[in-house]
Structure formats: structure tokens, C-alpha cells
């Protein structure tokens, strides 16, 4: 029964026949872990088994998969159940459209939308496509689609407007948001908590803090939308950014009053924002409250707390919190260790950082790309260039946690290439380029210009350099072209 509470349902799957999956579908899919590979494998097993599941169960599973950004398996599950004859509601179709966009791209989502029956092209499916455009920062398409929805007299809620306002925020156009708010009011579209929050952030972006306060007052006067803890975390963050710590702490006290359901995220925002005001006493007080509310404290909460303590330069406090986490954690999370490793590295405690990295490895947590990135910065600071290159190679070989490639920063590449140039180390430079090629398809003109300078400084020739530049489609500066004449000698 405890397992089924994850779904927020009271329906039981324990008494169904052998034609059905023997346990909740979500539990079955995550039986071997939460990685996309293991979930895909379990999904394939489920599909091949031809076992049945309840429709509500599929909906809950899709929700969980989307929350974890496992869009490909979610889409495959949705398509499989449709092929098996499971009817999709218009709401289901809107969710499917969103999955198509995330897994296969906008053109595929547009094709899915076009092929929907006319009866399904309502405010939900239009809204889903609009949201996809907004997520991909496709401003013209999003604006045109909202106009189309108005032309069709579709019932409009705050959702499409919220999506468009979020798009404007992300694309650096906060000045457009007040006009959207006025349009909502003119069309009798009720603002929700999210609408007020994005409006507040838009005003804060143009340094209109008094305007933010007027929005809060309007929200209170309106009375139809109850401010929740997110409103006050938003307000506190705005005050912190504006250099108003006293007002920020007043907002945080309101946040605590609103957190009647003891939301974990609210506790974490409190800790983070009290940290940003520099109030270490309040950070520890809220942490104690969080620990009481959640005795089985999650790794993410410890990560947040340790990061805040590190930011406040309370290294002893961070170490104490880390030791507490180590003694209690069921899964040793390298992200938590990375915070302390980073703190040690920043303070010049390289040996402590190395010991903690090995300690994490001993506990089963292999270094991540972020771990090696910390050491890259540390080694560069100490002019230990060989170790920096080795750490770059390690980070690239591991890659990001989401499966993407890890690419060293522009500053890291520039520093290392300048080192090779100054030491006339052609072999080192060429070796570093081979490492970089594993992370990026294009090395760029700046890297090759530095390489050319390295050859010239070392007095070495390489007849193939012009061909390499042509193959890489790189155009170097006039100064580099002159150096090419001296190094491209047969």
C-alpha cells in the first residue's frame, strides 16, 4: 500500500489477475534503477510480455516519467498503449503532443497536431503546442498561435498567457509582460499564482521593486488567488537581489507562515534565501525544522544545506553536516561530495579534496565530470598543467549526467593552449586537441591560431596544417596566415 501512495491513488493492483503486470507499472519500470537505459529495458520487457495495466496506471506512470525527463520511454509507452486500443482523452492527446515535441522535435509535434481529429483541436491541444513553442523560445510561432486561439474563440485560461510570459522572461523581453497582464484582465482571464509571480519577476528585471510591491498588494486585494509560499520566496529573492536584506527576511517569515503543508521545496528555499541574506542562525534553525519534518532527509536537502554553508564560508559547519549525511545516506551521491571537494579546492586544500574524492570512490560514487572540473580549475591555478589536461580528459570521457558531452570552458582551453605556446610544446598541444575532439565537433579558429603559434615558436613545420584548416572549415586571422608560410614547408 505504501508503494501505491507514490501514485496518489487508492486503487489496488494486488488482486488483479495474472493477465496484468504483477505490480504497479511505475514500480516495475524502475525496478532496476532510474537510468534511461534500465527503464527502456524494463519497458521493452513489459511490451513483449503483452501484460495488461489499468488506464489510470498508465497516466500516473507517464507523469512520473515526464517528471524525471525520461521522454523517450514515456512516448514509447504512450504510443504502445494507443496501439493496444487504449482510448486517449483530449487531455491525453495534449500530453502526447508534448512528449512528441520533447522526444522528436517541434516538426514532429506539429505533424501530430495537424493529424488530430478536428474535435480534438481545442484549447488543450492548442495550449500544448503553444507551450512547446515557448519552451523552444519560438516567439513568432507562439504569438501567432495565441492569436489563432483568439480567432477561434477558444476558451482561454491563464496557462497560454503564462507560457508566453515565461518565454518573454527567458528571451530578455520582460517589458512585454505588463501588456500581457493587462490583456488578461481585459479578457477576464483570471490571473493565477504563477501569473503574479512572473509579473513580479518582470518588474524586478527592470529594477521596479516598488512595482513588485504594488503587485503583491493587488494580489491581496483581489482575494481570488491566495498567495502561497512561492509568492513570498519569489519576493524574498527579489529583495535579496535588490540589496534589501531586512525586507527579504520579512518576506521569508511570511513564506514560513504559508508553508502549512510542510513542503520540502519551501524549506530548501528558506535555507537558500536566508543564506543569501547572510543569516547563519536562521539557516541552522530552518535546517532543524526540515530535519524534524523529514527524518529521512533526502540527499538533495543535504546538498543544498552544505552548499549554503560553504557559500557562507562556514567550512566547519559544512564538514559537520557532510559527516552526518555520510553516516545516514543509503546512496552515496557524488554531487554532495562535490560541494565539499569544491570548497576544499577553493581554499587551497588540494590534499583534502583528493582524499574526499577517493573516499567517495571507495563508497561506490565514481567521480563525475563536475568532480574533474573542480580539479581542472585547481590544477590550472597551481600551474600543474599536465594534471589539468589529465582531468579534462577524465571529465570528457565521463560526460554529463544527462548523457550530454562535457566541454571545458573557453577560459580553460585558452589557458592550456597559451601554456603550450609559451613552453613551445607542440606534442602537448596536439595531444590536447585530440582530447578536445572527443567533446566538440568544431575546435574553432582561436584554438588553431594558438596551435599555429606553438609550431612557429617551437620552430617546427607541418605541411598538413593548411589541409587541416580546410577540413575543419576554419578561417584564421591574417597574422596566422603569415605564420602558416613558415610552418607549412614541404
Image (cartoon, rainbow, N blue to C red):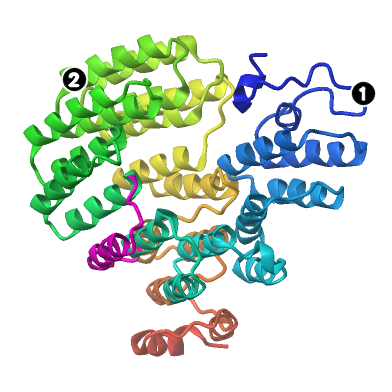
* Place of residue 205 in the rendered image (x, y in percent of width and height, measured from the top left): 20, 57
* Place of residue 45 in the rendered image (x, y in percent of width and height, measured from the top left): 86, 37
Nearer to me, 189 or 470: 189
Where disc 1 sits, the SS reads loop
Give the left or right position of residue 482, taking residue 442 as reference. left
The N terminus appears in which quarter of the rendering? top right
**Residue 57 image-quadrant placement:** top right
Q: Which residues are magenta?
A: 170-192
Give the left or right position of residue 190, taking residue 144 as reference. left
* Place of residue 7 in the rendered image (x, y in percent of width and height, measured from the top left): 63, 27
Q: Which mark is residue 18?
A: 1
Query: Which residue is rendered at x = 40% and y = 54% of the image?
Result: 158
Q: Which mark is residue 282?
A: 2
Prevailing secondary structure of the magenta residues: helix
The C terminus appears in which quarter of the rendering? bottom right
**Where 438 falls versus 143 (above or below)?**
above
Q: Please report contact status of discs 1 and 2: CB closer than 8 Å, yes or no.
A: no
Q: Residues within 10 Å of mark 1 (few under 14, many from 20)?
A: few
**Where 458 falls versus 20 (above or below)?**
below
Query: Which residue is rendered at x = 84% and y = 36% of the image?
Result: 46
* Place of residue 412 in the rendered image (x, y in percent of width and height, measured from the top left): 37, 56
Give the left or right position of residue 116, taking residue 170 as reference. right
Marks 1, 2: nearer the viewer = 1
Give the left or right position of residue 261, taking residue 397 as reference. left
Amino acid at each position: 500500500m505504501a508503494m501505491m501512495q507514490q501514485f496518489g491513488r487508492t486503487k489496488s493492483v494486488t488482486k488483479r489477475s495474472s493477465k496484468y503486470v504483477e505490480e504497479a507499472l511505475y514500480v516495475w519500470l524502475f525496478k532496476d534503477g532510474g537510468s534511461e537505459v534500465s527503464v527502456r529495458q524494463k519497458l521493452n520487457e513489459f511490451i513483449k510480455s503483452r501484460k495488461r495495466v489499468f488506464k489510470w496506471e498508465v497516466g500516473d506512470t507517464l507523469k512520473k516519467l515526464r517528471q524525471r525527463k525520461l521522454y523517450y520511454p514515456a512516448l514509447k509507452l504512450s504510443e504502445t498503449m494507443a496501439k493496444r486500443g487504449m482510448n486517449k482523452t483530449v487531455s491525453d492527446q495534449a500530453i502526447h503532443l508534448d512528449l512528441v515535441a520533447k522526444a522528436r522535435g517541434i516538426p514532429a509535434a506539429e505533424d501530430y497536431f495537424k493529424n488530430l481529429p478536428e474535435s480534438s483541436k481545442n484549447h488543450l491541444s492548442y495550449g500544448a503546442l503553444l507551450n512547446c513553442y515557448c519552451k523552444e523560445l519560438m516567439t513568432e510561432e507562439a504569438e501567432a498561435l495565441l492569436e489563432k486561439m483568439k480567432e477561434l474563440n477558444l476558451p482561454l485560461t491563464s496557462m497560454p498567457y503564462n507560457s508566453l510570459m515565461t518565454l518573454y522572461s527567458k528571451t530578455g523581453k520582460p517589458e512585454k509582460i505588463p501588456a500581457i497582464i493587462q490583456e488578461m484582465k481585459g479578457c477576464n482571464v483570471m490571473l493565477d499564482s504563477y501569473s503574479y509571480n512572473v509579473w513580479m519577476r518582470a518588474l524586478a528585471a527592470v529594477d521596479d521593486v516598488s512595482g513588485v510591491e504594488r503587485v503583491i498588494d493587488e494580489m491581496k486585494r483581489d482575494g481570488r488567488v491566495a498567495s502561497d509560499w512561492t509568492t513570498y520566496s519569489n519576493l524574498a529573492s527579489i529583495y535579496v537581489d535588490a540589496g534589501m536584506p531586512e525586507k527579504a527576511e520579512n518576506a521569508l517569515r511570511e513564506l514560513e507562515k504559508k508553508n502549512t503543508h510542510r513542503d520540502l521545496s519551501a524549506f530548501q528555499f528558506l535555507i537558500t534565501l536566508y543564506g543569501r541574506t547572510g543569516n547563519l542562525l536562521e539557516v541552522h534553525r530552518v535546517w532543524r525544522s526540515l530535519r524534524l519534518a523529514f527524518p529521512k532527509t533526502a540527499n538533495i536537502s543535504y546538498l543544498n544545506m552544505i552548499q549554503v554553508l560553504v557559500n557562507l564560508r562556514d567550512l566547519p559547519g559544512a564538514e559537520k553536516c557532510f559527516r552526518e549525511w555520510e553516516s545516514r545516506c543509503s546512496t552515496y551521491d557524488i554531487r554532495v561530495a562535490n560541494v565539499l571537494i569544491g570548497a576544499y579546492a577553493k581554499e587551497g586544500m588540494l590534499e583534502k579534496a583528493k582524499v574526499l574524492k577517493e573516499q567517495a570512490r571507495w563508497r561506490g560514487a565514481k567521480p563525475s565530470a563536475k568532480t574533474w572540473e573542480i580539479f581542472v580549475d585547481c590544477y590550472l591555478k597551481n600551474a600543474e598543467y599536465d594534471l589539468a589536461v589529465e582531468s579534462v580528459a577524465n571529465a570528457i570521457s565521463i560526460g554529463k549526467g544527462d548523457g550530454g558531452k562535457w566541454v571545458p570552458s573557453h577560459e580553460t582551453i585558452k589557458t592550456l593552449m597559451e601554456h603550450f605556446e609559451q613552453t613551445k610544446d607542440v606534442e602537448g598541444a596536439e595531444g590536447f586537441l585530440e582530447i578536445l575532439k572527443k567533446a566538440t565537433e568544431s575546435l574553432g579558429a582561436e584554438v588553431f591560431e594558438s596551435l599555429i603559434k606553438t609550431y612557429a615558436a617551437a620552430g617546427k613545420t607541418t605541411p598538413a596544417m593548411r589541409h587541416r584548416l580546410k577540413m575543419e572549415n576554419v578561417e584564421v586571422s591574417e597574422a596566422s596566415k603569415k605564420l602558416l608560410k613558415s610552418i607549412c614547408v614541404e
